[in-house]
Image (cartoon, helix red, strand yellow):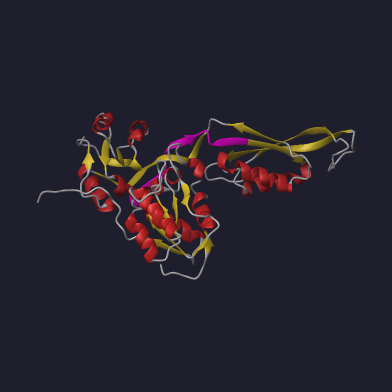
Amino acid sequence: MSATNMELKIRDILQSIQQIAPLSLQESYDNCGLLIGDEESAIKQVLVCIDVTEEVVDEAIKRECGLIISHHPLIFKGIKKLTPKGQVERIVIRAIANNIAIAAMHTNLDNSGQGVNFKIAEKLQLKSASVLQPTEGLLKKFVTFCPHSYADKVREAISQAGGGSIGNYDSCSFNSNGTGTFRANEAATPYVGQKNHLHEEPETRIEMIVPEFHISAVVRSLIAVHPYEEVAYDIYPLENQFQSFGAGIIGFLPDEMTENEFLVYLQTIFGTASLRHTAFIGKKIGKVAVCGGSGAFLIKTALSAQADAFVTADIKYHDFFEADGKLFLVDAGHFETEQFTKELIVEIIQKKYPTFAVLNSGVNTNAVCYFNKK
């Protein structure tokens, strides 16, 4: 895509991604978001990559990009000294010297139902794809109370702020009628009722599901439209799984394949020089689970989901035994399974800002090389 004169603040660019993959989805060990720079800075071009290397920073300088968005965080461990002795430190110094901001969208994008694994499933043409291991603890029950005449406005405000969505349905709520009581003191400015008099008001109780990362926005929106001076609301934790977010994706191939055909198919899609896998078990491959990057922790989940095959990376020797002759396990490479993340990030930003210049890095940052004797 050629550069345009359109400028955007770094904050707006990153928020376009975070709407799909909120930072609250990142794992506790991770370091996502803006790592270097000022989110209020305006830039004309952004460069997207998997890893930030010195070559990538040089590319950003050459192509006049004010922001680099990588999948893997440049700063993963603490930096105690900012001297040019280490690679990470050299990159940080060079980026700052050239006024280049750096951000990472890592496990937050891994754990999004529209993220890294969704993109892999798309490349593999998996049908009826769904999250393999949905996230628990993210959903809250949001309850509030308002006069009957305001119920529609309140429900709409909560929905617009991110509440009330269940699967393929939005604006989901449960409503019941009751009576609210309150007494306004001398300092109050009551919407209804009189000061120092107990008032009874017919009210609607509204209950809606809200993801944890939308709670603050929902509260702000509620207060903005609610007529009461003091707005009552309750937030309850839920044990429900959040089907739209979590680790891995599982779906069905367009047509069943033999194990050998499946390996050829994977090698064609990922371009991997060499595939590691469990022994052939002589079964057709139809239901496939995938997890970009290090996904061995999902082997048992893939087994429980009755997947025929599980494709991931960084599988240790003893992990292969967990397949137990029931699951065709394939290690397709860390970089290879995550390579489409660049394309994904570019698409997300361009969908939000079609005329903004989003550039795909041409630097191959795969640190793993393969040797095949001729």
Residue 341 drawn above or below residue 358 = above
Which corner quadrant of the image does residue 252 belong to? top left
Viewer-nearest residue: 83 or 73: 83
Q: Position of residue 9 (x, y in %)?
A: 54, 60
Viewer-side residue, 203 vs 99: 99
Residue 218 location in percent, x, y?
64, 44
In the rendered structure, the answer to whether residue 328 lies left or right of residue 108 reads left
Q: Residue furthest left?
A: 374
Write the start and end of the magenta stretch as one range: 122-141
Q: Main secondary structure of the magenta part?
A: strand
For the point 61% across and 41% down, the residue is: 215
The residue located at (54%, 57%) in the rendering is 12
Q: Nearer the viewer, residue 273 or 50?
A: 50
Give left or right: position of 212 versus 312: right
Report the side of 343 relative to 22 (left or right).
Answer: left
User: Residue at the spot x=51%, y=45% of the render?
Assistant: 22
Residue 195 makes an appearance in the image: yes
Where residue 116 sits: x, y (%)? 40, 48
Magenta span contains residue 92: no
